[in-house]
Image (tube, rainbow, N blue to C red):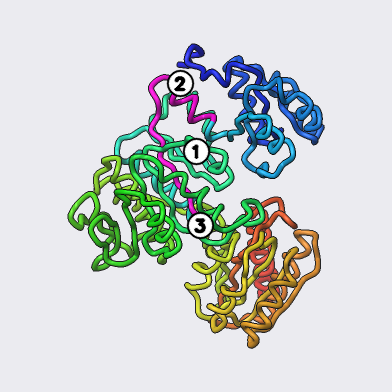
Amino acid sequence: MVSLSHLPQALQGRILVAGAGVSGLSIAKMLSELHCDVVVADDNETARHMLIEVVDVADISTAQAQEQLDSFSIVVTSPGWRPTSTLLVDAHRQGLEVIGDVELAWRLDQAGVFGEPHTWLAVTGTNGKTTTTSMLAAMMNEGGFAAKAVGNIGIPVSEALVAKNRIDVLVAELSSFQLHWSPTFTPDAGVVLNLAEDHIDWHGSMRDYALAKMEVLKGKVAIIGADDPYLVQLTSEADLSGLIGFTVNEPATGQLGVKAGELVDNAYGNNVVLASADGINPAGPAGVLDALAAAAVARSQGVAPEAIARALDSFEVAGHRGQVVAEHDGVHFIDNSKATNPHAADSALAGHDSVIWVVGGQLKGADIAPLVKKHEQRIKAALVLGADRAEIVAALKEHAPQASVFVTDKTEPFEAMEEIVTEAFSISEPGDTVLLAPAAASLDMFKGMGQRGDLFAHNIIGTIKGLTEEKG
């Protein structure tokens, strides 16, 4: 039940929505349904026209928006817009508040616009967000709550708030961009999984990126990955009281961890057994940490150990996160296209001994050299593609000189991946793992990390089929 009488004052004036993409559409749609006076600004006329075909709002260019800034009461920006964007900088100078989509939804919810405020559980970090969010939603539902994964996975927050069948618990996967634009967002529980260099080009520095992530720790329950030294250091400096941690080691008081092969809770119980570490999907340390993080949040909300065990037992990992595409002649082919930064690729590489590494894309300001140096003994060969291939090749030559290096200069997605996979088959031997763990973003060549992984798998399966037919 929507109550317009509870609409915050800033949203009762003229509202400028910055961006006409997917997020802008979601923002404009929600505000329009609340009968707000909405204007969408974007220099992409096609995107604007597509938006106004769906939502009855006004649209203008960013230059026009700048000229009219004094007529707006607030700016709601799409999360990808940088703080240095001219329109947003000018808005700040004129004293206008700039917020994002999550902050908007949060304020509306807290004001009672959608009835009794919902429970917000926020998940962020450099890697593991989607798996942890999905696990947590499953745990909450097994625990008897009406929960849904929202935000960057599942359904948009705006849709969840007005769902016909009320969703009581919003399990929100949130990016550093969204959190940067969420100054008052205070979830009931928040978890930061880990921190590593990512999106430095957007935030300006590693510290600013990390501080954006830590916005989720302002609520009643704050949970962090206790095995991440930088995260532990930052939270110590912030003097956050009552922190709960999770670790792959035996947990101290106030932590969840692993003891005698079992996931145990030593924060909300006395080493209460939750599940077997061997049964976690995805397998390996990264999957165990994701499960512990999700369990820590679920336990903070009163979910019983038995419900957590049931959720983990039936959990299936989402695509492009370590899936075995095929095994052929003793060679394993693994799709971890979701490894879009060096930190994620680190976990992927650590699970294999002889790797033919498919790597490359947009590094986004991250330094790949430490990753190469750490795993140089594992890297038998590297198959390099994408915009920052020269930087990657330089790191390989310096820190993994024994590895053979193949580089494709092709920029058409299918052609590039076809060339990479052909080379992988030509050099692989029994015992090798051909691992797509790019350590970089995909948008320089692909529509997204999903297409990158799909083309990798498509070419592998097609090649194996051809080889089998030749033998047959």
Task: Single out the mark in the foreground, 1 or 3.
Answer: 3
Task: Indicate the amino acid at tag 2.
Answer: Phe
Find disc 3 in the rendering and name its residue: 127
Q: Looking at the image, can residue 329 be seen?
A: no
Mark 2 or mark 3, which is nearer the start of the sequence?
2
Apparent side of residue 215 relative to residue 439 in the rendered image (left or right): left
Q: Are marks 1 and 3 in contact (CB under 8 Å)?
A: no
- Residue placed furthest toward the left: 270
Find disc 2 in the rendering and name its residue: 114
Q: Which residues are magenta?
A: 104-127
Tell me where residue 73 appears, x and y as whole percent.
63, 22
| Res 27 label | none
Residue drawn at (36%, 49%), measured in percent from left and top? Answer: 240
Task: Indicate the amino acid at tag 3.
Answer: Asn
Apparent side of residue 278 relative to residue 12 in the rendered image (left or right): left
Find disc 1 in the rendering and name its residue: 150
* Label 2 environment density (alpha carbons within 10 Å; few <14, some 14–19, many ≥20): many
Task: Indicate the amino acid at tag 1.
Answer: Val
